[in-house]
Amino acid sequence: SGAGVAESRQYFSDHAHFMYSIGVDFLRVDNAKFTADGSPPERGLPVYAYWGNKLKVYAPDLYSFGEAPAGPGDLSGYCSDGNRLSGMKDFPNVNGGGLRDWANPNNGGGSGNSFKGVFEANYTEYNRNGTPVMTNYYENHDHDRAYHYIGDNMAWNGSVGAMQIIMLWSGCAPGVPEIFYGDELVMMGKRGQTYPDWQATGELSTFGTTRR
């Protein structure tokens, strides 16, 4: 609530309309909470409800998705009713015994049972209305590339097969797969370091980290 909210949400809608008019098929909202960390997700929900209703009129086939470091209940709240975003990045399935640990050969291949438990526990929330609403996610611009996490850090051996496992999961799991640009080539890129000499950039931060 407060000054500027109506103008902000209308700008959001107009921007999406323009992007759709030039042929964009997908739009991603960075940190869909749209508020400071610790703020309740409900603060952002009315904005996306307004946007979602506008999209149904002028861009019914546009796929809109967002991200927020939150649990499955909060994430599904942005998209499960079909009136806001089309999907949300699947953070809870990635970390804490999830997809990347399962695919990581340095963890002995991870635990299939652990990942199965993580996925099944989250899926009820994701499939609340009978339609999967997650965007299948495994990394973003704030982290090391998945190559470094699941492979052997700054060498080449051992990571290609693990990346194939991640891609296979992303393409087969319920929801819409998202492939981070360059990962189809198993591209290198480490958080806060240069390539190829791996010198620290001094630009580490919680968000907005540069990978050069």
Image (cartoon, grey):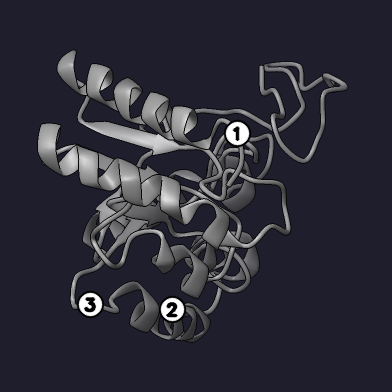
Q: Nearer the viewer, mark 2 or mark 3?
A: 3
Give me the C-alpha separation between circle 2 and circle 3: 14 Å
Identity of the residue drawn at 36% across and 78% down: 123
Q: For the residue carrying disc 2, how many other residues have a C-alpha within 10 Å: few (<14), some (14-19), or many (20+)?
A: some
Q: Which residue is mark 1?
A: 3
Disc 2 or 1, which lies upstream in sequence?
1
The reply to whether the C-beta atoms of the residues labelled 2 and 3 are less than 8 Å apart is: no
- Residue 87 horizontal/vertical position (percent): 33, 54
The residue at which mark 3 appears reads as 129
Regarding mark 2 in the picture, which secondary structure is present there? helix
Please report whichever mark, 3 or 1, sits nearer to the chain's N-terminal start.
1
Label ID, residue 123: none
Q: Secondary structure at mark 3?
A: loop
Separation of residues labelled 2 and 1 (CA atoms): 37 Å
If you read the primary sequence from the N terminus, does the residue marked by circle 2 or circle 3 appear first?
Answer: 2
- Density class for disc 1 (Cα within 10 Å; few <14, some 14-19, many ≥20) is few
**Badges 3 and 1: C-beta atoms under 8 Å apart?**
no
- Image quadrant of residue 120? bottom left
**In front of the other: 80 or 210:** 80
Quarter occupied by residue 205: top right
